[in-house]
Image (cartoon, coloured by chain):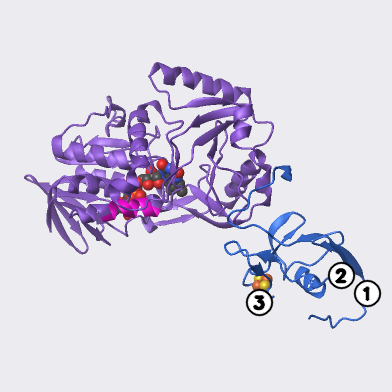
Amino acid sequence: MFMSLRRTPENTVTVTVNGQQITAPEGQTVWVTMALAGQITTRKSALSAEDRSAYCAMGVCFECLVQVDGLPNQQACLRRISDGMIIETQQITETTEAPLDDF
Amino acid sequence: MNADILIIGGGIQGCATAFHLARQGASVIVLEKDYVARHASGVNAGGVRLLGRDMAEVPLSKASMEMWQTLDETLGEDTGFRRKTLINIAADETDIETLKAREIRMRAAGYAHERIIDRDELRAALPHVHPSCVGGVTSELDGHAIPYKATSAFRRAAERHGAQVVEGAELTSLRQVGSTWIARTPTGTFEAARVVNCAGAWADRVAMMIGDHVPLSHAAPMLMITARLPHFAGPVVGAVSRQLSFKQFENGTVLIGGGAKGFADRDHNTTRLDYAKLAVASKTAIDFFPIMKTASINRMWAGLEAYMPDNLPVIGPAVNASDAYHAFGFSAHGFQMGPIVGQVMADLVLTGATPYDLNAFRIDRYDRKTL
Ligand SMILES: Cc1cc2nc3c(=O)[nH]c(=O)nc-3n(C[C@H](O)[C@H](O)[C@H](O)COP(=O)(O)OP(=O)(O)OC[C@H]3O[C@@H](n4cnc5c(N)ncnc54)[C@H](O)[C@@H]3O)c2cc1C
Ligand code: FES
């Protein structure tokens, strides 16, 4: 569905998106990285648990919240990827219970 | 406009007083300079807390706590009250010693609503608490409510019993002529036989108009609320000796208080936040609950609150005028007291007496005995 216009990136980094290893151009945003890999769901809606993804793609709407390195509520359309970054679809809904092995 | 009783201030104390008076048939006018629940009573942390009260406040606070359990039915409205239990966490053995000393005084006074818990019980109730915490103290009737809903519920219930609430009406002068109090506001003049001062952070000014001097100060306690977190805390949480206070709502958001103060400007109805202190409060929350390091703060605000030097309210009759009464200075824990304060004030105004000992709350307790 999505295609990068940049064919030959100078430097690449490797990140993990929901367990899938992805090598992508340095400087790319989290959301573009996810979308190019076919993983467009950044979070589940807190009330309906429906899939959500980027809407404005420019930092305004907060639709694209995602979990980065264990920290939820990060804007996927603004954050740039860095080597070793762990990106996960944010699952927090009104009924989520915190797992005890968090710390 | 005339009424039997004029109440200055449309916070929870003024609205609860109006409710208890009106339902006993008195005609009541509430004057509010802004709108009902605009200040402390609408923006506070909603903590309905009996735990850790000053000894002098316990009888009133206990009675209020009983009233909260059925307040929705009494008022015919949703106050958002949820009984949740409150736990104050003991971080170390020194805290446990503090709790044991208090327990001796509580038992001697005949109170049994606070119970010390050990490390195991603490961890069972709050599995996400930092493992270094050694125990705590709990009160099982405690919980939280939604401040603007509870205050508005009192207001509407009072109105259903015939009370009139006039918003945008700032009391600018008050004089007793014969047996009539004449109150002026920019929008009109009001007359009543009795007056009740529930003016919150501005109550010293109203007290002055009545004739009573009082060393009231005001400040701007701050709050923050997070984006939804996975559920990790059922009970309301405080700490024995650290500035920690938070509750997690059913929707997962966490309201964090703790008592840090911003900047208060009561002349302009405004507050400003002190972000450095909010950062310290956040750090404290993370120290006790490591899961909080994943929290995102959504909003921060502060409210204007009235404080007395001993952190106890003023509740009782005026000393330099007849037919005038005060209820203010709740020092950041007056929301829980609203239901009983309304009843006590109504009793005082209508019968001149109350079953409660109000000696600790006299307005003249700071009057100088010598020059
Ligand atoms: C941030 C914050 C958190 C808090 N958390 C808690 C908590 O968790 N639990 C708890 O029990 N308590 C808490 N409190 C304290 C509690 O909110 C207050 O003690 C309580 O609401 C006081 O009620 P009140 O009716 O006396 O004052 P207010 O709500 O301030 O009402 C007084 C009203 O009088 C009006 N007024 C003043 N002067 C005049 C005048 N001249 N003419 C007409 N009207 C006038 C004002 O506009 C105001 O609306 C907190 C307070 C704050 C600010
Ligand atoms: S898509 Fe709108 S903020 Fe990211």
User: Badge 2 sits on which subunit?
Assistant: A
What colour has chain A?
blue
Q: Which residues are magenta?
A: B148-156
Chain identifier matching the purple colour in the rendered picture? B
Residue drawn 81% across and 71% down? A33
Which chain's residue wears label 3?
Answer: A
Q: Name the amino acid type tagged 2.
A: Glu
What kind of residue is marked 1? Glu
Write the residue at 32% across / 59% down: B35
Dominant secondary-structure state across the stretch colored magenta: helix
Q: Quadrant of residue B164?
A: bottom left
Label 1 marks a residue whose chain is: A
User: In the image, ligand 2 is in what quadrant?
Assistant: bottom right
Looking at the image, which residue sits at the far left? B178
Residue marked by disc 3:
A56
Q: Is mark 1 within 8 Å of ligand 2?
A: no
Confirm or deny contact between disc 1 and disc 2 (CB under 8 A). Answer: yes
Residue B316 sits in which quadrant?
A: top left
Image coords of residue B328 (percent x, y) = 31, 42
Of circles 1 and 3, the one toward us is 3
Ligand 2 within 8 Å of disc 3? The answer is yes
**Residue B277 part of the magenta-drawn span:** no
Question: Distance of mark 1 from mark 3, alpha carbons?
Answer: 28 Å
For the N terminus of chain B, the quadrant is bottom left
- Residue placed under numbered mark 1 in the picture: A10
Q: Earlier in the sequence, mark 1 or mark 2?
A: 1
Closer-to-camera residue (B3/B170): B3
What residue did someone put label 2 on?
A26
The residues bearing labels 1 and 2 have C-alpha atoms spaced at a distance of 8 Å
Q: Secondary structure at mark 2?
A: loop
**C-alpha span from label 3 to label 2:** 22 Å
